Amino acid sequence: MARERATALLLDLDGVLRRWDPAVAAGVEREYGLADGVLSEIAMQWGRLRPVLTGQVTHADWVSSVADALTEPAGGPEQARAAVEQWQRYRGEVDTEVLDFVREVRAAGIRVGLATNATDLLDADLAALDLADEVDVVVNSSTVGVHKPAPEYFQAACVAVETPPAKVLFVDDEDWAIRGARAAGLSAHRWGGHADLRYLRAALAY
């Protein structure tokens, strides 16, 4: 049976609307004599990351825990804190082509929400990137208290965008998030780059 046409769009932030230049972290690691990739490796350890993505600890707490874990490889706590602070000052870059697409979609009367696993720094990031007014709603896992791909997250996202799951199109760059969205009854498309915009425009039929 054919699905209903989507009348709302939920879009992941990181990897879709916001890009991260890996050269920034690599430069910090070189400057402080750290192993390649260690900042991301430590920061993204699930036991450390999950609490900040579900609002149990703050972004500042998470950053401190990363610095603590880097104390030995960085050669002391001061060096570790300095390295992490320098790494964290970079807040990514907006993908302007995706932003143009978001503006098109909203101009056509389709509600657009950001659906992201993020910390309590998200609002400040969106303001710094001039994205705060570019979407209709923001569904932040640390505010909801549950993260993608849990069904409860997608239920909350659909409520926020005021659209039933069957009429929501979700876009993310991670397979596990796509699978979770589909299990929750949403249409979902794994983002592979700007070539996908043609398909998304057709799917939304605006």
Image: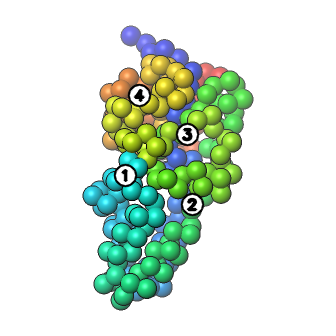
Do the residues bearing badges 2 and 4 touch, measured as CB atoms within 8 Å? no
Label 1: few (<14), some or many (≥20) within 10 Å?
some
- Numbered disc 3: secondary structure: strand
Which quarter of the rendering shows the N terminus? top left
Q: Position of residue 86 (x, y in %)?
A: 53, 76
**Residue picked out by circle 1:** 56
Q: Nearer the viewer, residue 46 or 6?
A: 46
Q: Report the mark closest to the observer, 2 or 4.
A: 4
Q: Amino acid at mark 4?
A: Gln
- Numbered disc 2: secondary structure: loop
Q: Nearer the viewer, residue 72 or 92?
A: 72
Q: Report the mark closest to the observer, 1 or 2.
A: 1
For the residues marked 1 and 4, what is the alpha-carbon distance in whole angstroms?
A: 20 Å
Instruction: Looking at this view, name the residue that lies furthest to the left.
Output: 47
Q: Residue at x 61, y 28 (%)?
A: 111
Mark 1 or 4, nearer chain start: 1
Position of residue 18 relative to residue 169, above or below, is below
**Residue picked out by circle 3:** 138
Do the residues bearing badges 1 and 3 touch, measured as CB atoms within 8 Å? no
Do the residues bearing badges 1 and 2 touch, measured as CB atoms within 8 Å? no
For the residues marked 3 and 2, what is the alpha-carbon distance in whole angstroms?
A: 18 Å
Q: Report the mark closest to the observer, 1 or 3.
A: 1
Label 3: few (<14), some or many (≥20) within 10 Å?
many
Q: Nearer the viewer, residue 5 or 118?
A: 118
The quarter of the displayed image where residue 42 is located: bottom left
Instruction: Looking at this view, name the residue that lies furthest to the right.
Output: 107
For the residues marked 1 and 3, what is the alpha-carbon distance in whole angstroms?
A: 19 Å
Mark 3 or 2, nearer chain start: 2
Q: Position of residue 91 (x, y in %)?
A: 57, 62
Q: Residue at x 65, y 53 (%)?
A: 127
Using the image, tell me which numbered label, if any, was put on residue 92: 2
